[in-house]
Image (cartoon, rainbow, N blue to C red):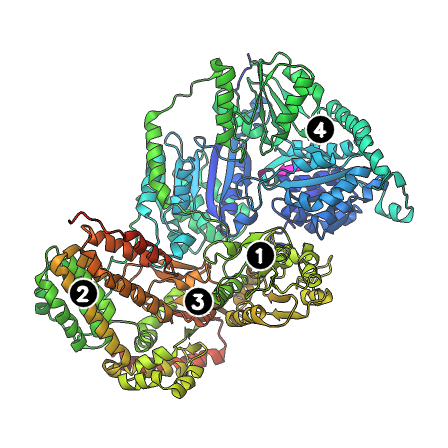
Amino acid sequence: MAERSFKEEVKTLRLGEGEVFRGEGILAVTKALLQSGVSYVAGYQGAPISHLVDVLADANDILEELGIRFESSASEATATATLAASVNYPLRGAVTFKGPVGVNVASDALANLASGGVKGGALIIVGEDYGEGSSIMQERSHAFAMKSQVWLLDPRPNLPTIVRMVEKGFELSEASNTPVMLELRIRACHVYGSFTTKANARPAFTLKDALERPMRDANRIALPPMTYAHEKEKIEGRWPAAVKFVAENALNEFFDGDADDIGIVLQGGMYNGVVRALERLGLADSFGNTRVPLYVLNVTYPLIDAEFARFCAGKRALLVVEEGQPEFIEQAVNTILRRADIQTRIEGKGLLPMAGEYTGGVVRDGIRRFIEKHRPDLVAGEPENELDKARLARAASTVAPNIHGRPPSFCTGCPERPIFAAMKLVERELGPHHVSCDIGCHLFSILPPFNIGNTTMGYGLGGAGAAALNASATKRAIAVLGDGGFWHNGLVSSIGNAVFNKSDNVHIIVDNGYSAATGGQDLLSSQAQNGIRSTRNSIEKAVRGVGVKWVRTLTRTYDVARMRDTLKEALTTPEKGPKVIVAQSECMLNKQRRERPIAAKAIKDGKRVVRDRFGVDHDTCTGDHSCIRLSGCPSLTVAPNPDPLRAEPVTKVINSCVGCGLCGEVAHAAVLCPSFYRASIVNNPNAWDRLKARLRNAVIGALQRRLEPA
Amino acid sequence: MTVLDLSARPITIAILAMGGEGGGVLADWIVDLGQTGGYIAQATSVPGVAQRTGATIYYVELFPKAAAAKAGRDPVLALMPMPGDVDVIIASELMEAGRAVQRGFVTPDRTTLIASTHRVYSMTERIALTDGRVDEAGLLEGCRAAAKRLIAFDMAALAEATGSVISAVLFGVLAGSGALPFGRAAFEAAIRRGGVGVKASLAAFAAGFEAAESGTPAVRQPPQGSGALPPPTLDGRDAAAGASDLEIFPDSAREVIRLGVERTTDYQDASYARLYLDRLRPFAQRAEDGRLLAEVARQLALGMAYEDTIRVAELKIRPSRFQRVRDEVRLSEGQVLEVAEFMHPRIEEIADTLPKRWGEWLLGTTWARRLVERFAKRGRVVRTTTILGFLQLYAVAALKPLRPGSLRFAREQAFLQSWLDAVRRTAASDYALAVEVAACRNLVKGYGETHERGRARFNTLIAMLPQMAAFPNAAEVMRELRKAAVADDSGLALDDAIARLSPLPKAAE
């Protein structure tokens, strides 16, 4: 079960002709897919399109009604290869994943798919994770569109345009026999808006038809000599067809303005930011009326030469607003205009930053520089309030030293935290080790308080990242993988590789029962029963299946001492070959989400429910905070010292504590202080509980009175 | 010329929160409020990994429907806040409010800043070996300087008091601020339509609304440790010091000394408190500004009330402690509480508690050591609320009268005496440095390894005292070294600070 449920929202997917849809971008995309008559959808979760996968899972009933097959793909490569169904058959299909890391994984399938081309519309919805809040390296998916020559849509971030681009994307794909990528930036995925719906369409040609009447065309298979023909086809046939379709259907948009000797060309996704910047500069209004002409590229690849020639006619200067680098569009515009011998001056990354997110302030400053340079008469001369500026400067410098970064971290009660606490304890005894990390929540280990981990090379590549570090030495490298990464790629690329190459390294596989970092989707090894997927497949069996001999499965990661000792054994055993520790405990975020309502209801119904939480006695806490340095739990924090003789804050456990037990285990394993206590709160105690309590209170109370007579 | 329609602009609202704080719910309420109140609403957020306790921004724009209808087209709304263009900022915590100021979102020409002044401490603040907290006053001052209007108070406490979550209080404050063109009823209707935890949310909303409307003071007093003093823990049985005993000390230090007397009496007995006063007396004569006396009095009290197994057992079984735990876990009527302690006395702590000669024998006798070590290898969980568990701790606490004969007692007293001697010697030539030397005792605290580490660093600093004479600013140098000694676990920072000290300045020649 995913972290967020869309069971309510997916009802809007049934809206018919001419009704109004209200909701998030992701849900609008799903509705657009249904309106377009897709036959199948597939995807691999990851921000910002995790919710698209969750929506599809929650909408499975609706999809089935329409005869649509939905696959939770094993990886982005799997998802893209799924589009092979559209090569031979007039089937529309869509897949989704995170860009650009997903496109990296998908690129093998993408190249093969793009080479032969498609018959049915094939759409790849890529959620761009760039800029603020991003969890990955900052690159562009654009390069992959260019490399494999698939078309790239970057719609204006409003629901009607996004929906139209989904629908037109399928048509473009079919008109040019080419897969189409639809790029959605993170905020567009989550933007709340509305659009007028159409009825859902059932595909005329079905998957059943394809299975029962298979067709093949050897010319569509990526194997020489066909591949040579494919390359020519792309240039001579598919590209011109795409250009024609884009131009005829006016997929790109032009907005006129009276300052027509200059203009701005922009990626569709930048539109709202550009209009707001112009508005702040006095050159546009809230409705998008603008004095500076705009050319909005809802299609950023291919570019349409004739449209550029037309837009640049009579213009002295053109500003290209293109987020990310390299500046593929700016370079292409230069080529287009030079070839056409058009003398318009092209500005872009010279006035806007080459790297980094184009936030509101960045775009405003860049456009202001462009206007100042080429139409200084238009500069409204925003009155700068010197007093305000001084005030702001003072304010900023006052707060600056008091602000710390607040990166994401392990949640309260996270079962992965004790694994790293144990690693810290092993570090104390055996010294530091080289640690190769993977993608997933466990990567938070690289940050304080653990500061563990040297590299991360990609999903499921934790073990692979330590492959070279296999030499005769007194220490072994440690690799960390999550269950998500393990099934995505890790079984083969990390574990299988280690077996085959006779590696001596230690692999820790963190099995929390979910693809947790992406929102709690189920995996092959999830413990939950999932009606439409096969779960409960053992990681240990899989690992043994590829030939690992030394495997230990720990079913309670919170047992820090055991975790520490197992890790020590793995690091020191004379046994050859890879050592694999499967560290199992359910993701606390998902566990709480599942169990908390059940417990609340049971308490309400008068049933006996025991809730554990931890606490710290402030009068024995000396304010050293070692316990926090071995945990970092959000519920384990500091508080002003109630002792007037002491200044340093004491440790405090706040009420969000879920009683995972780590504090006590760490206090024991690391021989910390005796300040931690576990409070077990018995709700609706039974008669035996009450009797025990009465007896205890009587005896203990009497003893306490001897201690401290009233 | 292109005609611009400047009749309407969106209302821009940014929410700065941490993952899991209900910022999304708050944004949903605002969207609903706008949509039903005649506005087009657009909201965006960056969920993903930022949900995992990281800082994140929700952004909402509201645009009047009537203006859009008149213009015959939809507005173009931005997806992220732009510095200088934010009408309302809602910060769920004080550092996040500061972050909004730092990022330029709060401007004096337009921004109403609604900030809860409670703290959710950052990792950096929490993992410090001593006090790593940032300056709250600085954050508030920055907020006040940048905002057109600041509404700031502890909204988390209000949420707690009303049994709800902070998002509902923030929504109430937003309503009470009058920053949005909607009446109270419209806000409340949005909560009702939301349908989750309606009753508690409405109560929290009302509390927030009233606090904002009645102009609650923008600044709450930070609850500092030196605030209200705890009630005396003594019942008069063994009061060590009458008023006359304290009178010989200057006013400025008397309060600390009173606390010290109380602490040492509570720790052992009246004669122990008299020892405390005797040790302080030599410093009363060198009062000057009283700083040294106060620091010595504070440190001596803490040093004399060192944490041993007897003290821990005694503190754990007190009725006041039982009550405190009940309060802290918010035990309500009809619930039963069971408490378990996590303790790990090592052989060292066991030997420490024994009479001096037995303790030395235990540590020095291999077979006995092995035997006890086996027993002390694992940590113990003591169930204090069971009769057996309570009796275990009660028995340890009962050893209190024997404490003055214990191994640890002898060691601690010798340590304190040598520290006092060092302070006194230093005070003869450099008063300010002596204050620093007095403060160094605080390096020695905690249990087990933490205690040993602190002791080692204390010794390092004291050993440097002879060199200190060469520094014209010796007190400052010592203060920096003391800070370095608590900068990390490894001790690298202290080594580094010491290495940077040489060569010694030649100014004295």
How far apart are labels 2 and 4 at the CA level?
Answer: 80 Å
- Do residues under tags 2 and 1 come within 8 Å of each other at their CB atoms? no
What residue is shown with label 1?
A436
How far apart in space, not on screen, are marks 2 and 3 (Cα)? 41 Å
Chain designation of label 4: A
Badge 1 marks a residue whose secondary structure is strand
C-beta proximity under 8 Å, tags 2 and 4: no
Q: Are marks 1 and 3 on the same chain?
A: yes
Disc 2 versus disc 4: nearer the observer: 2
Circle 2 — which element?
Answer: helix
List the residue tagged with mark 4.
Answer: A302
Q: Are marks 3 and 4 on the same chain?
A: yes
The answer to whether residue B198 is left or right of residue A517 is: left
Q: Are marks 2 and 3 on the same chain?
A: no
Side of B467 relative to A206 (left or right): left
What is the CA distance from the residue labelled 1 to the residue labelled 4? Answer: 40 Å
State the separation of the CA atoms marked 3 and 4: 60 Å
User: Which part of the image, by quadrant, shows the C terminus of chain A?
Assistant: bottom left
User: What amino acid type should be assigned to the residue bearing mark 4?
Assistant: Pro
Q: Quadrant of residue B99?
A: top left
Of badges 1 and 3, nearer the viewer stands: 1
Q: Residues within 10 Å of mark 1 (few under 14, many from 20)?
A: many
| Amino acid residing under circle 2 | Ala
> How many labels were placed on the picture?
4
Q: Label 3 amino acid?
A: Phe
